[in-house]
Image (cartoon, rainbow, N blue to C red):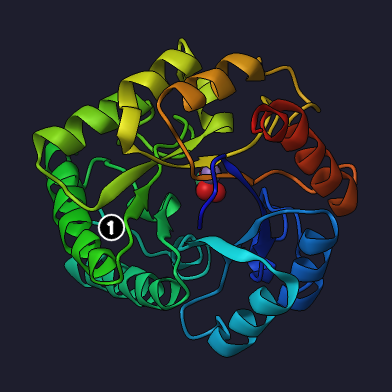
Amino acid sequence: MGYRRMKSAVTICLVPEARQGPFVFHDGLEAGCLAAAELGFDAVEVFPASAADLPLEQLRGLLVTHGLTLAAVGTGAGWVKHGLHLCHADPVIRGRAREFIAAIVDVAGLLGAPAIIGSMQGRSDATMPREMALDHLADALHELGRVAAAHGQALLYEPLNRYETNLFNRQVDAAEWLRLRGIRHVKLLCDLFHMNIEEPDLAAALVTCGDLVGHVHWADSNRQAVGFGHADIPPVVAALESIGYRGFLSAEVFPLPTPQDAARQSQASFRHHVARLAS
Ligand code: LER
Ligand code: MN
């Protein structure tokens, strides 16, 4: 570690079904790690098809070879590929969702990284009223947070915009709920794309969440690389600085106009807004 500043990361998706998703690199771990290192990123964030599909030793070797760290590992393939989520009305599916996530928490933990619960949180609906859904979510976060803590990691919970979940859309609502429920070992993943849709004031939300901010998805208003949209980034970086955030700014953005352009712009925007602040 030893960083006195926030760190840059870029996403690598290993799931063909998520090819249209907001991930920069889609051509495997080797090509993704090489490109990330060449552009000067500190880390990569990986979206695997499952824990079993994440080649632990190969990834460990690539990280060492390229001087990268692993920022986080996504669990969304459980939803995208298998239709699992934590608030499903069917207890068997909820159980399989937990097992799917727990296995990724373990493999990420072995690589020194946290796992992300984004789309795997699911949503409430006519078959699953909100209060019951939140009980299921709390129970899962308690249990999976303990699995993460056994690896010395936090579990990352990501509020999403209203078109992707109806559980929590704003960071402060999620933060208050985590505190109220006494859920430990869980931190917030603040995705600037979702926040641009939902937050009245991104900087104020980050400051209020304070030390619960555990990870940031570094994206512009249109989910392209920062600088390719119209988000007002300096107040966001100032807010993160003011709360002493030293985690990752991870480019989870569309590979537009090309993966290389998205990666290069993400790194350029990181240098422009963040790295130059560090002495
Ligand atoms: C995942 O990090 C995310 O932001 C969601 O929109 C699910 O793709
Ligand atoms: Mn995200």
Residue lying at the far bottom of the rendered structure:
57
Does residue 77 sit above or below 172 in this rendering?
A: below
* Displayed quadrant of residue 200: top left
Q: Is residue 1 left or right of residue 105?
A: right
Visible residue check, residue 34: yes
Percent x, y of residue 94: 24, 65
Q: Which residue is mark 1?
A: 86
Q: Residue at x 74, y 45 (%)?
A: 254
Residue lying at the far top of the rendered structure:
200
Visible residue check, residue 224: no
Q: Is residue 129 left or right of residue 76?
A: left
* Displayed quadrant of residue 277: top right
The 10 Å Cα crowd at callout 1, few under 14, some 14 to 19, many 20 or more, is many
Percent x, y of residue 148: 29, 65
Percent x, y of residue 58: 64, 87
Quadrant including the C terminus: top right
Amino acid type at circle 1 is: Leu
Q: Is residue 30 left or right of residue 111?
A: right
Q: Residue at x 50, y 26 (%)?
A: 241
Q: Secondary structure at mark 1?
A: loop
